[in-house]
Amino acid sequence: MKKLITVMAVVVGLFVLTGCDDAEVASHNLSKDADNFKILRKVTFINTVTDEVLYTVEGNFAIVADTEDNQLEITAKTGEDEFQKHFLGLSPTTVYIVEQLEWTEASKYRFKITLKPSALIPDVEVR
């Protein structure tokens, strides 16, 4: 059953990406790598009234813009199995810039599926 679901997901993914141009595929691959903590990034918050840099975050992290709570959520990988979560409030007088700090290969031909072992293997507690 799991194999059937995996095959169906691959087929649907291929159909979705068939209509995409090279830039869209490369952008998708870069975004996936960033969400999997493989891309070094820097976020800078700037006060638009004073042009003052308020805050910077640098490292391997995933970003979610939470428009409902008007904040930027950053989940950073700080070690092999160590993570931190930061919430940065947004206001009408602040702007943020996200920079990719290193060049990364993103193939326009490569389609990839990332499977998390924890999604396939249940968390078993032995007593």
Image: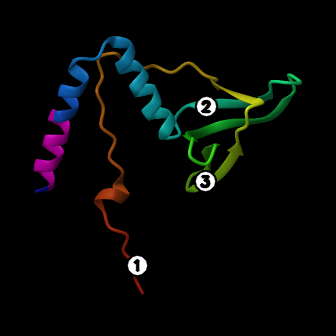
Disc nearer the start of the sequence (1/3): 3
Residue at position x 85%, y 22% in the image: 51
SS of the residue at dot 3?
Answer: strand
Depicted 70 relative to depicted 99: above or below: below
Disc nearer the start of the sequence (3/2): 2
User: Can you identify the residue that label 1 sits on?
Assistant: 125
Depicted 30 relative to depicted 69: above or below: above
Marks 3 and 2, how far apart at CA: 15 Å
The part of the image, by quadrant, that contains residue 126 is: bottom left
User: Can you identify the residue that label 2 sits on?
Assistant: 40
User: Can you identify the residue that label 3 sits on?
Assistant: 83
Q: Residues within 10 Å of mark 3 (few under 14, many from 20)?
A: few
Residue kind at label 2, given as amino acid type? Leu
Residue at position x 60%, y 38% in the image: 60
Disc nearer the start of the sequence (1/2): 2
Q: Residues within 10 Å of mark 2 (few under 14, many from 20)?
A: some
